[in-house]
Amino acid sequence: MVARLQALGFYPGKKVTKLSAISQKGPVVVEIDRSRIALGYGRANRILVEVEE
């Protein structure tokens, strides 16, 4: 799974913005480097992020 996420642009320290999420285990859309990526609930649920305020 790590290699697939890196191919999509997910790297430690990279800024990720959550754009939308469908309730009840639907897909999650995030933005990385001005690219929008849709992740399934199962994959998105396993990604840990640090919230920046």
Image (cartoon, rainbow, N blue to C red):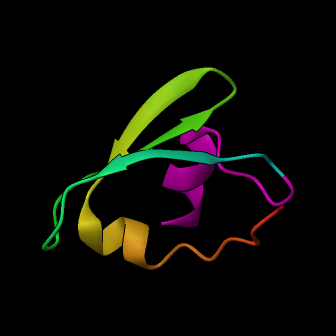
Picture coordinates of residue 1, whole percent (x, y): 47, 66
The residue depicted at 65 percent of the width and 49 percent of the height is: 10
Q: Residue at x 26, y 58 (%)?
A: 40
In the displayed structure, would residue 32 be above or below residue 14?
Answer: above
Name the one closer to the observer, 36 or 2: 36
Q: Residue furthest front?
A: 53
Q: In the picture, residue 33 is in which quadrant?
A: top right
| Residue 11 x, y percent position in the rendering | 75, 53
Residue bounds of the magenta highlight: 1-13
Give coordinates of residue 29: x percent, y percent.
38, 43
Give the image location of residue 6, x and y in percent: 63, 49
User: Relative to 2, is 28 on the left or the right?
Assistant: left
Q: Residue at x 83, y 61 (%)?
A: 53
Q: In this picture, is 16 found above or below 12?
A: above
Question: Magenta stretch: residue 2 in it?
Answer: yes
User: On the rendered structure, is 1 left or right of 15?
Assistant: left
- Quadrant hosting residue 51: bottom right
Instruction: Please tell me which residue is depicted at 17% across the width and 66% down the height of the picture.
Output: 23
**In the image: residue 49, left or right of residue 22:** right
